[in-house]
Amino acid sequence: MSFSLPAPRMNRRDGKLPLFFEADSMDGTSGERTHASGSVRLRQGEMRVRADDLVHTQADNTARARGNVRISSNGNLFTGPELTLRLDTLEGNFIRPHFWFARTQAGGQAELVEFLGENRLRAHSTRYSSCTPDDEPDGTPGRPDWELQTSQVDLDFDKSEGEAKNAVIRFMGVPLLAAPSLTFPLDNQRKSGFLPPSFYFDSASGFELSAPYYWNIAPNRDATIAPTVSARRGAGADIEFRYMEAQDTGKLRVFGLPDDKLRGSTRGLIDFVHKGSLGKTDALAQTTYDIKLLRASDDNFWKDFSHIQFSTTPRLYDSHANVETTLNQRYWGLGNSQTTFYGSVQSWQTLRDLAPPSDPTQSNISTPYRREPQMGFRSRSVSDSGVVFGLQGEFNRFGNADPTQVVGNRVNANAIVERPFTLGGINVLPRATLRGVSYDLDKVADGNRRSATIVTPTFSLDSGFSMERATSLFGRDLIQTLEPRVLYVYTPYHRQNDLPLFDSAPRDFNQYAIYTDNAYTGGDRISDANQVTVGVQSRLLDSKTGAEALRLGIAQKVLLADQRINPLDSKPVTQRLSDLLLQASTSVIPNWSVDSTVQYSAQNRQTEQGAMTVRYYPGNWRTVSATYRYRRTASEQVEIGWQWPFAGHTPPLQQVMTQATSPDLLDLNPRRPSAGGACGGTWYTVGRITHSMRDQRIINSLVGVEYDAGCWIGRVVTERVALGTSKANTRVMFQLELLGLSQLALGANPLRVLKQNVPGYRLLRDEGKPLAQPGNTTPYSDE
């Protein structure tokens, strides 16, 4: 087994620098020998030596120190009874030293340390730990919670490599990992080797164990090969390959289970991502491309392996290939412009719920349309007079895995002309848009047209202004704004109910959609409109930073005529006043934040949908949030998330950062660097729970406990994910971090799950730099 040991920083030094002595008494022969006794201090460059007695001989430039010897350099500290050191070559030995490394905030002791030159040393019978326990009542040193023991350690700072023999890591006196010989990097460079094993319990798969191996193929390529064993499913493998070229990056991950004992079949998933560009980054023409392939072996994969999902939509897997070329500052007779040409192909894999008692709403998922292919361009020009011209054209060939669906070709062409004005402080933006769509279908539903062409003009006039005044609240100097906005849109009606819906869907009701001129996304539908949208918002801005402290807003559409194309119904919209959009968010109260959005039907006097989040964060590693979501016809949920210490002492963040970067450790005891550095103990609880008030059940939950002992961190996290109305998967994850060994982690790593699911979650120990990759295990050597 291997790990990474961040070594002490060793700077180049000049052995010919002058020596400076301080002592209670000094004698000797000039130019030959100097003897100092009583509170001896020797200084050469950054190196400092203290001792009770010291003899320096000029011929070999050697210092021999005895009694309470202490040597420090670059924040690293060695103490012991006797030191012999050639100051020009740094060759010598230190008997029974204690040591402390500033970089790792960890140290230990050895029977003997041999200095083999400026950047090489060898330590015999070493003990290393970041724990600093108190002494026993009888005065003997206390036993650290964790400790790395080796028979010999060789460090070569020129090669940035270290080798340890007969290494054993003990936790609470129990051996966890052992290796007869291992090598490790002394900096942040990657190195091949076995990673610590990962294990957890899963309600579907039982106990699972993984022993990953990291392969540092080249400076720009690496791979992680992780054989896995599941108590219920059998043996498998999880392999990830990464690469980074001058203009290309990519990642390939393959998961395979040759013989799933529970399903009786071969299971697996492949995830490939590649991104790149052509040409120089500062060139006028830029070409970028990306490729993604994501496929699972079967429909049940999303349920059985929910912990290794590769997609934000666990049951819809997207695969595509895109290419895009952008031309900047090209003159088309309309002014400076930017034109982009693009093309892509896209397909989807839909995973269905095939279980007999499955909920139809879970099993019946409409398969998205494939693009076979998509090709288009978009251009935007700005003339000297300020007139903006826009043009976009696109061709799509739509296919579908469902043979009952309509398939065929679609061509879209859009053109816009707009010109912004400022009239007496009021911003006015008139815009004229012309949208065209043409279909040539291979297969149509009953009553639908096989081919059709529609050209629809749209005129809009957007206007608004902003007023400001100074104010103060809760001791803060603020600027209050008042920002009204009015948008008029006119689009004539064209019949479209007999045309397919390839990629169009109704827009959600939010602050962006209410100010658009089309009620649909995509290119299949153009809603008719003769309407005015009226809204106003007021904000409080910090007068020094400009940060937003409060936002209040209200907006509503007023129909001047019936809207015949209704995104939510087959009947026209005859109601003159739309639902109200209400928004409120604030962080003006110290340590509190509130964010809410409500869609309210004034005509029916009821709330259609809404969401509200309240968060309290009084300090580091202390956060509690509550979210309420409501959709009148669909769901009602309450979600609570938190991270909070419930026992022990939480050190201030500044104290932790100061201890981790302090270069001055000369006066610190190497076994007890500071009161805050001792293995204390702070317990934290962390989690997120989502409860459905309509179904009266918990949908998803994540609950865990973290313990920060100062020199190690332990975590136990339980995650429950609903896979339908009657089935859920539960996983229990364990992790142990030994701080000072590049945060050697044993067990499953729940940090990604915590950061993704707990709002405001913060790592107990933030790392300022990326950690080095683990080292290499080598065969046992008798040397």
Image (cartoon, rainbow, N blue to C red):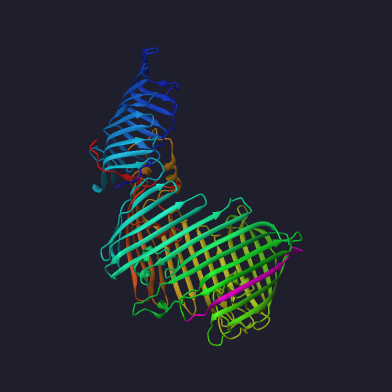
Residue at position x 31%, y 27% in the image: 93
Observer able to see residue 651: yes
- Residue sitting farthest toward the bottom: 447
- Find out whether residue 411 is within the magenta segment: yes
Task: Judge whether 175 appears above or below 419 on screen.
Answer: above
Task: Judge whether 742 appears above or below 293 on screen.
Answer: above
Task: Judge whether 338 appears above or below 99 on screen.
Answer: below
> Where residue 430 appears, x then y in whole percent?
72, 69
Magenta segment, prevailing SS (helix, strand or loop): strand
* Quadrant of the image occupied by residue 393: bottom right
- Find out whether residue 167 is within the magenta segment: no
**19 sits left or right of 93 in the view:** right
Task: Judge whether 733 appears above or below 722 on screen.
Answer: above
**190 sits left or right of 454 in the view:** left
* Quadrant of the image occupied by residue 424: bottom right
Observer able to see residue 144: no
Quadrant, the C terminus? top left
- Residue sitting farthest toward the front: 442
> Where residue 50 appears, x then y in whole percent?
36, 26
Residue at position x 34%, y 74% in the image: 727
Q: Which residues are magenta?
A: 404-425
> Where residue 449 appears, x then y in whole percent?
58, 84
> Where residue 311 appears, x then y in whole percent?
44, 65
Residue at position x 43%, y 36% in the image: 663
**417 sits left or right of 5 in the view:** right
